[in-house]
Image (cartoon, grey):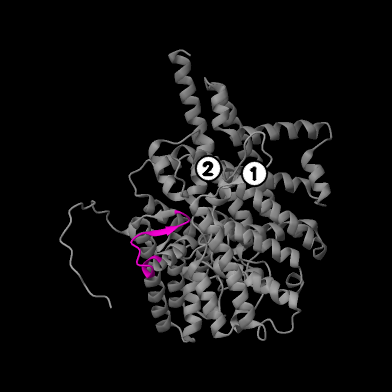
Amino acid sequence: MDSKNQSFRLKYLSILRTVIVVSAVIGLLSILLEYGLNLGEEYDTILHMIAPIVVLIYILYFLSRFYFEKNKIEFLRSHVIESVVTLFIFIEFILTLIGGSIIQRISSEFKLNDITYIYIVLAQIYIVLGIGLSALRLNKNILESKIHPARLLLLSFLITILVGAGLLMLPASTVDSNITFIDALFTATSAVCVTGLIVQDTATYFTQFGHTIIMLLFQVGGLGLMTFTTFLAIFLSGGLGIKEKVILKEMIHEDNMNAIQKVLSLLILVTFIIEGMGATIMYFSVREQFAEPMQAVYFSMFHAVSAFCNAGFSLNSAGLMEPVIHANHIFIFVISVLIILGGIGFPTIIGIKHYFSHKKGEMRIKVKLPLQIKIIFVTTAFLIVFGATVFYILEVDASLAGMTWYDKIFHSYFQSVTSRTAGFNTIDTALLRDPSALLVIFLMFIGGSPGGTGGGIRTTTFAIIVLSIVAALKNSDVVRTKNRSISDEIVKGAFLIFFVFVFFVVLGIFALSITEHHDLVDIAFEAFSASATVGLSKGITSDLSDPGKIIVIILMFIGRIGPVTLLFALSKQPEKVNSQYPNENISTL
């Protein structure tokens, strides 16, 4: 390509790039105006004309880039999503001309009559996707910056929460188009931090547009915004540098630096597969309760994502206590399985294939679990059984009264599962006895596992602390388990997490006891639930004062980021001191 053609190419693409930026902004504004402001059919008709034009500009820009690109194969690899979508649009256009439209067949299957509107919606989705993909390509520049990873994580969640609060304040997000900023901020924080505490009834206060915004917020929050966007940046641009891998190593708890890119790809894929499978099973268990199939699809999808992300949001005012759902054991059991899978952590799920091995010629399969995975599995199983057993004993004649023996066991199991991470409830937690409330606080405090969507101090931290206490009682200088020793650095880290978490929770309880006039157990329950991003409540969330809501917002944010991570983000990293001073004995007994 000579200099003249090169100059023309650059000038042409520069002009087209400017046009696409302007058109993208106009397209996004048209979508927000239509869905966010409820302007009426007359304006919607005008706004609908914008979407196809913007899509055509996107396609023109993509094809122009492809035409001028020297290495076309590499270009397609780094623009997989745009390539697939453009190819689909081309195929759909041809099939429509010959009467075999894929979209029309899907619409007929789900009894969707307005085909034109469906095309408009798909065009709008394409616009949002295009804007998202363009923004995500900037993610590598962010990762290459000198900002500390902890600060990147903190800022990513903070920005997502503020954007989410802004979207929830749009008139179309709520039924009466009247939500205060503090309530919008509380709901957005609860969703992004996958907590599930609500100050307004999700089912009746928000519209389907609002529900969708909330679902997107806890999907992004569950995966971790930086992990989510970085995966897409990798998928779009073709790889990561050394620094990006170091940052992501800390974010997704993966020791193998060379496997980071593969792990991130699997992370997103596995998430969508698990959520999709859960939603499918739930759909077949509830489809008879809905007049329209799409209502059942949306209901199932919302709860599947909420469960796997351990968010605890529900489209029922009574949550899973809704009579029809409460009796649907399949639906509730699938919820519990999704909660467990989301809570045990992505590294645990993704690494499953490495746990099994067999030699050629041998029939048996050997299971070899890394120590961390053993600790996660054993601790998780113990806490589920322990929690269910104690809950059954404490509540058998209280909140479980009137149920069959099977239902008492089943709901005790579910409460044990959901109390550590999710926040769904099939029992009215406001009526729990104080001993049961303390049990739930204990389970919330421990929370999920490393790399998972739950909160708390984590199962591994709890296990290491227990093992450290056992070692101290045995007068052993080394913490051992399963023929392995745990380094002093890890033990110190576990105790640091424990005490910093306790410090923030106690501080939160103290602050709430000043601003709120409720029983101390109820306040402590609320503080632990917010800090551990669980979402269970003794019924005081909706009665919180504005200062109380702000305190809970802060606790949810700290709980999702992690107290220790927050301290690292806010403090200046000192240089490591290698000098050692003389030891001094201080009595602790």
User: How far apart in space, not on screen, are marks 1 and 2 (Cα)?
Assistant: 24 Å
In terms of sequence position, does the residue under pointer 1 or pointer 2 come before the other? 2
Give the residue type at disc 1: Ile
> For residue 472: magenta?
yes
Q: Secondary structure at mark 2?
A: helix
Q: Say if residue 122 shows up in the picture.
A: yes
Report the residue at 74% width, 54% height from top: 280
> For residue 134: magenta?
no
Note whether 540 is above or below 307 in the view shown: below
Q: Which residues are magenta?
A: 471-483
- Which residue position holds label 2? 263
Note whether 505 is above or below 513 in the view shown: above
1 and 2 marks in contact (CB < 8 Å) = no
Measured as percent of width and height from the top left, residue 106 is found at 79, 45
Measured as percent of width and height from the top left, residue 413 is found at 65, 70
Report the residue at 75% width, 64% height from top: 330
Q: Secondary structure at mark 1?
A: loop
Q: Which image quarter is the C terminus in?
A: bottom left
Circle number at residue 98: none
Report the residue at 57% width, 43% height from top: 354
Packing grade of label 1 (10 A; few <14, some 14-19, many >=20) is few
Residue toward you, 231 or 245: 245
- Which residue position holds label 1? 365
Measured as percent of width and height from the top left, residue 231 is found at 52, 43
